[in-house]
Amino acid sequence: MHDIVDLRSDTLTLPTPAMREAMARAEVGDDVWEEDPTVQRLEDLAARLTGKEAALFVSSGTQGNLVSVLAQTRHGQEIVLDRDSHIFNYEGASAAVFGGVQTLPVATERGFLTAGQVRASMRPSNIHIPATGLVCLENTHNRHGGTCCTPEEIADVAAAARAHGIPVHLDGARIFNASVALGRPVADFARPVDSITFCLSKGLAAPVGSLVCGSRDFVARSRRVRKMLGGGMRQVGVLAAAGLVALESMVDRLAEDHANARALAAGLARMPRVRLDPGKVQTNIVIFQVDREGGSTELAAGCLARKVKIHQIGPGAIRCVTHKDVDREDIDRALDAFREITKPW
Ligand SMILES: *Cc1c(COP(=O)(O)O)cnc(C)c1O
């Protein structure tokens, strides 16, 4: 039980005592010179877990996606992605700003491009038309409520892109949630794609950091791009040390977050004016609609007064994310708050 039940995001997780201890003891060196042994251990582990040749530690998921786009495209190209993807909505148009790359957003049903949509998005060779440079996927899907696609679905989409000679990037910020939810190793999701990024700083609870994984050649290019972006960090093993603890000890417990999200969704589904399909809650994100004028604002304010924090992600839409600093009692407290506020509705 915590004083404040903070369901706004899994990025709010605080580092564990084991992480702080590992950070204090970390053996470090200058990582721009590739001499930080702790960063190297983290990158080796990330490469092994994703089944890729190499990995690169970056400051954030946003930087990881940008590095992946810049390392695999040229100015004037186009990247194909889902309309609700994080890259399209929440990264400040970075691919356009820093990469000179335009986006082709495609509306999808569950957040996942189909092979048919990828084929239909490929540009013909013509001097008028931008050349397709990269296809980007996202798993689990943030704006679609933490939904997962399977390794087979990814393979299907990737094959469609590869048939046109186009590489595929997977924004796997929460790929460990997908892995735990579907009971499949992360490498299965990563195998069909050319590059994958994942975050240490969300459900895995490390304070900072993401990894970019792919072939040795791709990671070498990414290292150069990261340096250009000002992302070359020196004795950064102090941060990588927490990331190692995250990968070694924080993955299996994600199942608890998923169970808490299901409990939250089941309770919410019974409340008046709340619209959600609890069957769609596969991981740690619960998105629901409030069918009442001003209802979502009222709910967020009412919750805050009861020391429960939730996040309004659009008109009438609320997002709750479960994580290691929210336990079952906290979920019950949140549900009590929701019940009190929605009762007169
Ligand atoms: C959080 C998130 C990111 C970016 O991560 P930051 O570390 O916050 O920059 C990228 N993609 C998805 C799907 C995310 O949820």
Image (spheres, rainbow, N blue to C red):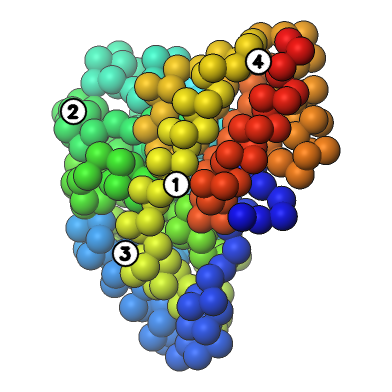
Instruction: Residue 47: tell me if it is visible.
Output: yes
Q: CA distance from mark 2 to mark 4?
A: 36 Å
Q: Closer to the camera, 98 or 186?
A: 186
- Mark 1 surroundings within 10 Å by alpha-carbon count, few (fewer than 14), some (14 through 19), many (20 or more): many
x, y (%) of residue 262?
43, 33
247 sits to left or right of 23: left
Q: Tag 3, which secondary structure?
A: helix
Residue 249 numbered mark, or none:
none
Q: Tag 1, which secondary structure?
A: helix
Q: CA distance from mark 2 to mark 3?
A: 24 Å
Q: Nearer the viewer, mark 3 or mark 1?
A: 1
Residue where numbered disc 2 is placed: 156
Q: Earlier in the sequence, mark 2 or mark 3?
A: 3
Q: Image quadrant for the N terminus?
A: bottom right
Q: Closer to the camera, 272 or 135?
A: 272
- Mark 4 surroundings within 10 Å by alpha-carbon count, few (fewer than 14), some (14 through 19), many (20 or more): many
Q: Earlier in the sequence, mark 4 or mark 1?
A: 1
212 sits to left or right of 7: left
Above or below residue 21? Residue 194 is above
Disc 2 marks a residue whose amino acid type is Asp
Disc 3 marks a residue whose amino acid type is Ala
Residue where numbered disc 4 is placed: 290
- Mark 3 surroundings within 10 Å by alpha-carbon count, few (fewer than 14), some (14 through 19), many (20 or more): many
Residue where numbered disc 1 is placed: 257
Q: Are marks 3 and 1 in contact (CB under 8 Å)?
A: no
Q: Closer to the camera, 121 or 284?
A: 284
Residue where numbered disc 3 is placed: 46
Q: Are marks 1 and 2 in contact (CB under 8 Å)?
A: no
